[in-house]
Every structure is written in C-alpha cells, then in structure tokens.
Image (spheres, rainbow, N blue to C red):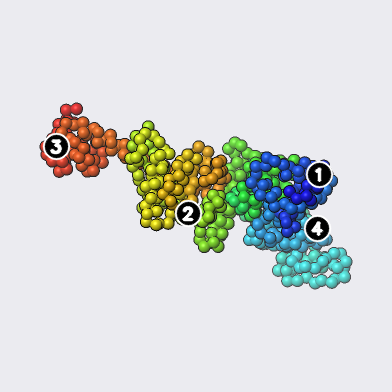
C-alpha cells in the first residue's frame, strides 16, 4: 500500500459516492459506488480478503479518487456512466464498443420515426436497444406498411405549412403519406397515428387492435366507409403480426425475463420481452467480467446496462438470483419512471420458471458462439482445452490427457484403468488395463504408484514425450503417491492433477488446499467426463476379472477339470449357462470327449 493511499484512507468521508482505483500508469482499473465511502473503500485493504479478483485488483492499486454524491442512487448512475466511458479492467463491461441502434420518435409537431445510434436528450422517444439490426428493420418495415408516417427529414410546423415551403412528394401520391407538409392531415390526427405506432413498439398490439376497432366502428357509424375500410385493413395486418407472436403466459402481465451465462471472462445475457402474455422481443448482450464473477454482480451489471437509457420498465423482472444492490436498483427505477418493478425469482415449476430456463439456454448458446469464434481465431484449438489450460494454470494446451482409476472389491482383484483423451475426445484404441500384482489388500495409494510406475517407466526408457496432462481419480493422497513415483523414475516436464469425487475438488501439485473450478465451466465438465470414463473402464475390467475367477472356480470344483481346461472353456464360451446347455459334441471339440463327459455328468446329476 502506497503512502498516498494510506493518507487517503485516513481521511475518507462517510458520504455516498463513487470511488476509482488507478494503477501505476494512472489508468482506471475499477469503479465502484458506496453508501458509505469510508467503510466501503477501507474494506478492500483489510486482512482476511479471500476473493482472488479483489486480491489481484488491490495488488495493482497505486492511487484512488472519490466523487461524493447526494445519494446512493446518484452514485449508481454516475458509476454506470464512468464504467461505460472508461471500461475498467475489473468491472463488468459491454463486450462491443459499438452503440446499439434505437428507433427514434422525434419531438416535433409532426414527428419522424427512424433508426439511430445517437441519443439526443431533446424530448424524443427512443425504443430499443435493438441488439439485432434485422429485428429493428422488421419493426420499421411493419410500421411503414401499416401507418402513413412521413419519410422526409424536414421540420414541419404550422408556419412551414402556412408559407407552403414544402410540396407533397411521391409518398403522398402512392398513399404512403397523408401529406402533413401541406396540412392535408391535422396535427392532432397525425400525432394520434404516431401514438398508435408507439403502442406497437411497446408490444401493446392487442390494445392497439381494440383501439382501431373502436375507430372503425365510429367511422362506419358516421357513414365514412372509406376510412372504416382503411382501418379494417390495418387491423387485419396487425392480427397477422400478432398471430406470429408466441403466447408464453396466461396471466397477461408485462415482464422481462433475464438469463445469464458466464465462463471465464465471457458473459452472455439474453432478455425476453413479454407483453400481454406474448413474446414480443429478444435482446442479447455480450459482456466481459473478471473470471469467476459472482452471479448477483453479473445480474446487477446487466440490469443497469439494459435499463440505463430509454427502455420501458415492465411490471415484473424475472431473474435467477437477487441482483447485487437490490434496494438501490429499486430506488433507481423509481426515480427513472416513478415505479418499481417487482423482481421475481421463480422457485417452483411454472410458466415463468420455464421461460427463465429458455432464456438461460439462449444465453448459453450465445456464449458457446463466442467460444467457437475464439476457437477459430486461435487455430481451431477446442475452447474447452483453452479453458482447462486457464483454470488449471497449465503451461500448454492439454491436447493429450491420460487419466488413471483404481478398482477393487474389499481388496480383491485390484485393477487399474488408463483412458486417453486427445483434443478433448476419447481415443479408445489407446485405453489400457492393468492388473495390480505387487500390492496386497485394499491400498489405493500403493496401487496408484504401481500403475503410474509401469506406465511412465516405459516413457522414460524410450525417451517419449509425456502427455500434456496426467490425471488421477482421487484426492490429495492419490496425487501425492503419483507425484512421488514420477519423481523417482525421473519423468521430466509433467503436468498432473487429482480430481476428488466428493466435492468435485481439483488438487494441484504444491497446493495444500483443493482448488475449485466453477460448476458452469466447460473445463470442469471435461474433467468429470474423463474421470467418469476412467471409472467406467476400470469397473468393467474389474467385473470381468471377478466373473472369470468365479466362473473358473466353479468349473475346477468338478473332479478331473483343472485350471487349463477351465481356461479353454472360458475362452470358447461366454458364460456358465452356455456350458451347462452345451451338447457333448460341442464340449468335446474344445476339451476332448472324456473331459466333456465329466462336465455333462456333473451338471446332469446336480
């Protein structure tokens, strides 16, 4: 800790505000907010911090600065803006620097409606953000098809109309515009149409259809059949559009469902917009975070990024966990739109829980797409191997992994298996079985030493390259046994780990405590798959050995039948039932007529 930081820690105010951490090059590496700056900032520099992220960050802090605010909500807004501006390394950030497009409804007497990436706080309304440009274009295409919104860029008001500065264009003649530039539609009627567009953009399609039905009936009552027919056509088009929207809930509550998936520094978020029970939109964001960031922190960041601009706040927001700074977020929502959404964390099986799971699966797919793109850039190295290298802190990509497992039953018929995975996939032609013959009784540690010695002594003698990763099924004891024997036989440059079944803990050399890999990580799933495959292979071999011993013992109990004859029968027939049901001729072909008669007589008399 520098003297500058020590002095600043002594004089921290107890006010709400934002703090910024700087590294030695005076670059902002973290921005945070606090209800009480004194307590919050000091907590980073206390003993007993266990978070790897916090320890790594604090070790790089050379200076800090504060911005005092009037409230925690004000601090939250400022924190969000600073994160977007500076993209500090240890904050959760949007992956893309590009801004997302919105649909803008301008603040004019005769509003324009068009796409934009530039936000101007001039009273205009914005709808989005659209994370897929195709979705935005489809919305604009629908608007232009149903409503006669002007496409020109002129500013139009009563003075412009009165002075006849603008003439109607082709759109008017082909009935795509009602000619507001020449006052051919009143400002009231034009803005009524714009309000209907806003309802459509907000997903209130059913409400809009009901409103247009009322207008159509009114026009028909007043014998204005041409206008009634025009409105009818609008209704028909909206019904077609509405029928394509999937009904996902029966309670018709407006809600957003947010699902997140993360691995390493990659975070993907999917947001499903449900209005009046229909799925009306999907938004997807990719973010970067510190490795193994807490889920509540991720949700808090996603919510602040998504709702920070002009996004409509629904009645409910469905999430997996309660976001970090839950109370502050509620107060922030209240200040934004004078209403608090209700955060829902579904526990029981329901429509909402199913939607949340669907949302999360979409986020997982998005995350896998990121990993696939990175894999292509890195020369087709499977992402799971890159993740394994990262999580286990290996020197090289573990293209070849060899895993060992021991199997016995109360110390009898002890065997070992070795399975081989190449490029993350099993290579069964290189699987190996070992009969443990130097160890008496149930001793997994000694058995592991024997099989490791037998496998890698040959590697040393023939000067072969060891696998990129050796893996033993077991905890600290099995790992220590394997390392001891590898050092005795002078195997060089080996990487080895142990994977314990109980808590899926990973043991690394020279680490007294188990290392935990996040359960969502693809690298842990690969390790589990390899371990389970080694266990399956060992168990299968052990059963075969046990069955063979049982089978041979029963045959040798027949007077005149020895081990060699029993072995011949074992090779020819798959099980004891086949021998019992075999004819004299079938048995005689294998062991001769005299021995065959002994077996036939034995089973006929018993």
Q: CA distance from mark 1 to mark 4?
A: 41 Å
Q: Are marks 1 and 2 in contact (CB under 8 Å)?
A: no
User: Alpha carbon of mark 1 to alpha carbon of mark 2: how far?
Assistant: 49 Å
Q: Which mark is residue 595?
A: 3
Q: Are marks 3 and 2 in contact (CB under 8 Å)?
A: no
x and y, in percent, of residue 543 in the image: 34, 38
Q: Nearer the viewer, mark 1 or mark 3?
A: 1
Q: Which mark is residue 493?
A: 2
What residue sits 43% from the left and 54% below the top?
A: 466
Query: How packed is label 1: few (under 14 Cα within 10 Å), some, or many (20 or more)?
Result: few
Q: Earlier in the sequence, mark 4 or mark 3?
A: 4
According to the image, label 1 marks what residue? Answer: 10
| Mark 1, secondary structure of its residue | helix
Residue 64: % across, % down = 77, 51
| Circle on res. 121 | 4
Instruction: Identify the residue at image location x=82%, y=42%.
Output: 14
Mark 2 surroundings: few (<14), some (14-19) or many (≥20) residues within 10 A: few
Task: Identify the element where label 4 is drawn.
Answer: loop
């Amino acid at each position: 800790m520098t003297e500058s930081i020590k002095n600043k820690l002594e004089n921290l105010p107890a006010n709400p505000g934002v703090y910024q951490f700087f590294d030695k090059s005076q670059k902002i590496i973290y921005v945070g907010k606090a209800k009480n700056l004194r307590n919050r900032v000091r907590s980073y520099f206390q003993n007993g911090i266990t978070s790897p992220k916090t320890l790594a960050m604090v070790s790089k802090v050379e200076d800090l600065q504060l911005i005092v605010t009037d409230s925690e909500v004000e601090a939250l807004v400022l924190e969000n803006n600073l994160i977007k501006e500076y993209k500090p390394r240890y904050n959760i950030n949007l992956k893309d620097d590009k801004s997302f497009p919105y649909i803008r409804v301008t603040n004019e007497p005769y509003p324009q409606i068009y796409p934009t990436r530039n936000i101007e706080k001039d009273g205009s309304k914005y709808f989005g953000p659209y994370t897929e440009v195709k979705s935005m274009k489809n919305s604009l295409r629908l608007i232009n098809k149903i409503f006669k919104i002007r496409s020109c860029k002129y500013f139009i008001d009563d003075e412009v109309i009165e002075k006849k500065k603008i003439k109607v264009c082709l759109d008017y003649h082909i009935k795509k515009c009602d000619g507001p530039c020449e006052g051919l539609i009143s400002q009231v009627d034009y803005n009524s149409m714009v309000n209907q567009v806003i309802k459509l953009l907000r997903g209130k399609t059913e409400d809009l259809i009901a409103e247009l039905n009322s207008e159509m009936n009114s026009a028909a009552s007043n014998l204005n059949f041409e206008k009634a027919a025009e409105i009818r056509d609008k209704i028909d088009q909206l019904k077609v559009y509405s029928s394509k929207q999937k009904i996902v809930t029966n309670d018709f509550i407006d809600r957003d469902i947010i699902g997140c998936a993360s691995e390493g520094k990659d975070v993907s978020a999917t947001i499903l917009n449900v209005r009046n029970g229909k799925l009306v939109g999907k938004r997807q964001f990719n973010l970067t975070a510190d490795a193994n960031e807490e889920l509540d922190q991720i949700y808090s960041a996603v919510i602040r990024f998504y709702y920070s601009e002009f996004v409509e706040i629904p009645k409910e927001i469905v999430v997996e966990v309660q976001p970090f700074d839950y109370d502050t977020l509620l107060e922030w929502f209240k200040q934004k739109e004078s209403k608090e959404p209700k955060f829902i964390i579904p526990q029981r099986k329901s429509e909402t829980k199913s939607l949340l799971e669907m949302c999360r699966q979409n986020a997982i797919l998005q995350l896998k797409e990121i990993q696939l793109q990175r894999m292509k850039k890195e020369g087709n190295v499977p992402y799971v191997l890159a993740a394994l290298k990262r999580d286990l802190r290996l020197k090289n990509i573990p293209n070849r992994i060899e895993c060992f497992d021991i199997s016995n039953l109360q110390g009898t018929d002890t065997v070992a298996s070795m399975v081989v995975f190449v490029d993350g996939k099993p290579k069964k032609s290189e699987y190996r079985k070992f009969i443990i013959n130097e160890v008496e009784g149930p001793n997994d540690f000694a058995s592991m030493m024997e099989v490791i010695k037998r496998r890698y002594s040959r590697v040393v003698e023939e000067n072969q390259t060891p696998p990129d990763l050796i893996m033993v099924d077991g905890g600290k004891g099995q790992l220590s046994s394997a390392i001891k024997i590898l050092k005795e036989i002078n195997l060089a440059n080996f990487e080895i780990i142990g994977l314990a079944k109980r808590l899926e803990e990973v043991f690394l050399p020279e680490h007294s405590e188990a290392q935990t890999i996040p359960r969502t990580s693809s690298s842990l799933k690969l390790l589990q798959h390899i371990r389970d495959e080694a266990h399956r292979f060992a168990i299968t071999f052990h059963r075969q050995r046990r069955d063979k011993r049982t089978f041979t013992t029963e045959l040798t109990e027949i007077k005149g039948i020895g081990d060699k004859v029993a072995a011949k029968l074992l090779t020819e027939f798959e099980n004891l039932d086949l021998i019992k049901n075999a004819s004299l001729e079938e048995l005689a072909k294998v062991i001769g007529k005299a021995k065959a008669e002994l077996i036939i007589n034995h089973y006929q008399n018993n």
